[in-house]
Image (cartoon, grey):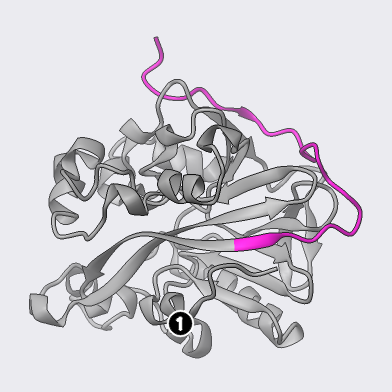
């Protein structure tokens, strides 16, 4: 038996697209943690990487962050998720889901089974088995933790991200391979395929339902195959940045995070997002780990 999921190429567009469709968006928080200030915003210098992981920072000065995902309701395709948030077990014993290394890193995370994505779906009258599609912005452990809780879903992943997540020593780069269970249906996205097109300021995008309601845009840099998501709401767009921007400060001031897979690609993706906001100033911009921003979000956007 394979030790992890055996991916297949994604076939797009997915069924359920409707001309002119708009979607409803539910931001979901499945837990909270804390990171050194230099993890979110780089402290330049020779020790920048070490400072990002806490060198010289008192624990009392660490910055609280949310661990997040999104529920998207499409009128034809039904409900889908963007990322999975934290597994229900994280608040009890994070090592059970994350292994010893990241279990130790997440030892102080504030999470409960009631905050998990599956619990929040049930609160909204949805069976987790109804989720047919999960868009993965990337495969770091805080985004993949609850993949196994969604057994009927197909997980859309950039093929470059899958390569990075399953490479030797991927654990040292934020990936936990145990999350990629053999039973999971992983579908790989090729951003060099014929159906890839530009969209506003983004050089590469995929319209996953063929109706313009949910577009995936390539935003590499944080990881090799990071993607962000552009949604068409009733009266405006929403840009779910993922970890292409941890905070609004990065979006507004271009402050770099403590670490990236590729600084050049990160800056290029950031500029594409910033230019998109300039061209569509009413866009709801949602960064990946900005607690102040997330606490100000509404429970649902239409």
Q: Is residue 170 magenta?
A: no
The residue indicated by pointer 1 is 250
Check the image and report above or below for 188 versus 57. Answer: above
Question: Is any part of residue 222 visible from this angle?
Answer: yes
Please state if 246 lies on the left or on the right of 191 as rendered.
left
Vertical relation: 31 (above or below) 89? below
Q: Residue at x 64, y 70 (%)?
A: 301
Q: Nearer the viewer, residue 281 or 257?
A: 281
Quadrant of the image occupied by residue 77: top right
Q: Is residue 272 left or right of residue 15?
A: left
Tell me how many marks there are: 1
The image shows residue 121, relative to residue 22, as above or below, that is: above
Q: Position of residue 34 (x, y in %)?
A: 22, 69
Q: Classify mark 1: helix, strand or loop.
A: helix
Looking at the image, which residue is at 72% across and 56% down?
214
Residue drawn at x 49%, y 53% as measured from the top left: 224
What is the x, y in percent for residue 101?
Answer: 16, 45
| Residue 30 appears left or right of 103 | right
Residue most extreme to the bottom: 253
Magenta region, main secondary structure: loop
Magenta-drawn segment: 1-25
Which residue does the image show at 56% across and 46% down from the upper left? 125
User: Within the magenta stretch, is there residue 6?
Assistant: yes
Residue 56 appears in view: no
Give the class, few, some or many, for how many residues have Cα within 10 Å of label 1's Cα (few <14, many ≥20). some
Q: Nearer the viewer, residue 181 or 129?
A: 129
Residue 155 vertical position relative to residue 124 in the rendered view, above or below: above
**Residue 164, image quadrant:** top left
From the viewer's perspective, tell me whether residue 229 is left or right of residue 185: right
**Closest to the observer: 186 or 235?**
235
Viewer-nearest residue: 221 or 105: 105
């Amino acid at each position: 038996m394979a030790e992890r999921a055996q991916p297949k190429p994604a076939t797009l567009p997915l069924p359920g697209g409707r001309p002119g469709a708009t979607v409803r968006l539910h931001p979901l928080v499945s837990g909270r943690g804390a990171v050194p200030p230099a993890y979110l915003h780089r402290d330049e210098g020779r020790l920048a990487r070490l400072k990002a992981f806490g060198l010289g920072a008192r624990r009392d000065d660490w910055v609280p962050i949310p661990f997040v995902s999104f529920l998207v309701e499409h009128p034809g395709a039904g409900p889908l998720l963007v990322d999975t948030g934290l597994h229900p077990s994280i608040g009890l014993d994070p090592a059970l889901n994350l292994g010893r290394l990241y279990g130790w890193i997440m030892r102080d995370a504030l999470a409960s089974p009631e905050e998990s994505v599956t619990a929040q779906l049930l609160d909204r009258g949805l069976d987790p088995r109804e989720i047919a599609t999960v868009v993965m912005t990337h495969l770091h452990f805080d985004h993949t933790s609850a993949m196994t809780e969604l057994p009927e879903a197909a997980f859309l992943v950039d093929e470059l991200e899958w390569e990075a997540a399953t490479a030797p020593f991927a654990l040292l780069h934020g990936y936990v391979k145990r999350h990629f269970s053999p039973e999971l249906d992983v579908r790989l996205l090729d951003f060099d395929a014929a159906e890839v097109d530009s969209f506003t300021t983004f050089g590469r995008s995929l319209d996953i339902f063929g109706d313009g309601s949910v577009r995936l845009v390539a935003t590499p840099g944080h990881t090799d195959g990071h993607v962000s998501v552009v949604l068409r709401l009733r009266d405006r767009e929403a840009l779910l940045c993922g970890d292409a921007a941890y905070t609004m400060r990065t979006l507004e001031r271009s402050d770099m995070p403590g670490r990236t897979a590729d600084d050049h690609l990160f800056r290029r993706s950031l500029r594409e997002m910033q230019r998109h906001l300039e061209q569509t100033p009413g866009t709801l911009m949602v960064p990946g780990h900005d607690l102040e921003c997330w606490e100000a979000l509404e429970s649902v956007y239409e």
